[in-house]
Amino acid sequence: MIVDAHLDLAHNALDLGRDLTLPLEELRRRDTHKDIPVVTLPALREGGVGLCFATLWVDPKKHAGPLAAHQAAREQLEVYQRWEEAGLVRIIRGAAELQAHQERWPADRVPGVVVLIEGGEGIREPGEVAFWKAEGVRMIGPAWNRTRYCGGTREPGGLTELGVELLQAMDEAGLALDFAHMDEQAFWESLEVFRGPVCATHANPRSLLGGADTPFANRHLSDAMILAIGERGGVVGTVLFSFFLDHSWSRGMERVGLEVVQKHLHHTARLIGWDKVGIGSDFDGGFGLNENPQGLDRPADLARIGELVPAEARSGVLGENWLRWLETWL
């Protein structure tokens, strides 16, 4: 079973109007966006992706303010719930469901979904965390760009007072914290406040991307941050957007090679071990096929990641590391 720790499925369905119940080639024929689709639900089944962390990500330009963001996030959650009712996905809400899913998946190939709030703006105030947990959310990443909760990509800063309260509420609810997009100041402050399970669903080593002075530098993880995640038992998911693998790359250039992906995987593993390295493709996160590394054109191609790591690490990196991490707290 391949596990992909970051897909924006509901955002693609609602904001981009993509029918993700279609076969991938059919969606590509119909789609009018400049970014060529890489993911549909049938493609996940066919590709052996048995579990993904699927986001509630609200575009702050389209849904400005807590009320609008909250409504948009609820509408995205309803997408996953409708898919579940139709038998197209299985929302994983607890350890027993995760175990049952792993037992059933080899026969029915229905993808499992762990619901992740990315950006946090749809949470109107920290007291609402319990509501989102009751609705099936199991992970929260408070940052995207800067939010009401903390600094984020290209907009640095620490935790706000609301951010501290949010992490405390997450601790009480038993939810996991996703550090992806979080600014480094907020990251270190979060480690002082939050005691629960942590990870970075889709983030790469900053030291391979030009260091601290390059564009989007605070989108990536310093080696010290990676070490801290490992010390807390967390997993780091390698993100597969070419610009987040090679900071000299830009749209329109030839796609980066898989050897660049390999470099990132090995760097993270040298810091925290192969048992804490996974995949967080972000295959549908505002880019498409031409922005992915060469040879990664659909979910089935994620299996090629296994060719980039030592044989004894393949099953872990492709999925077992994320599954083991989930089992420790879900």
Image (tube, rainbow, N blue to C red):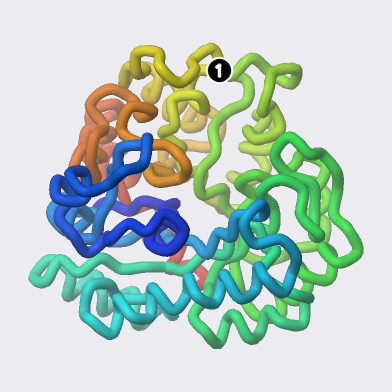
**Which of 90/68 is in front?**
68
Residue at image location 64% in from the left, 37% down from the top: 227
Residue at image location 8% in from the left, 70% down from the top: 107
Task: Name the side, left or right, on which 157 lies relative to 276.
Answer: right
Local SS, label 1: loop
Find the residue positioned furthest to the left. 107
Above or below 44: residue 37? above
Find the residue positioned furthest to the right. 161
**Which of 265/80 is in front?**
80
Q: Is residue 227 visible?
A: yes
Above or below 94: residue 208? above
Q: Quadrant of residue 242?
A: top left
**Residue 41 on image: x %, y %:** 24, 60
Above or below 107: residue 188? above
Image quadrant containing the N terminus: bottom left
Q: Is residue 279 visible?
A: no
Q: How many marks?
A: 1
Q: Badge 1 is on which residue?
A: 247
Tag 1: amino acid: His
Task: Name the side, left or right, on which 313 lies relative to 118.
Answer: left
Above or below 39: residue 135? below
Task: Name the side, left or right, on which 154 lies relative to 317.
Answer: right
Q: Quadrant of residue 248?
A: top right
**Residue 50 on image: x %, y %:** 25, 60
**Residue 235 on image: x %, y %:** 51, 48
Task: Name the side, left or right, on which 130 lies relative to 54.
Answer: right
**Residue 197 on image: x %, y %:** 60, 63
Category of crowding for the residue at label 1, using alpha-carbon neighbours closer than 10 angstroms: few (below 14), some (14–19), many (at least 20): some
Residue at image location 66% in from the left, 49% down from the top: 144
Residue at image location 21% in from the left, 37% down from the top: 301
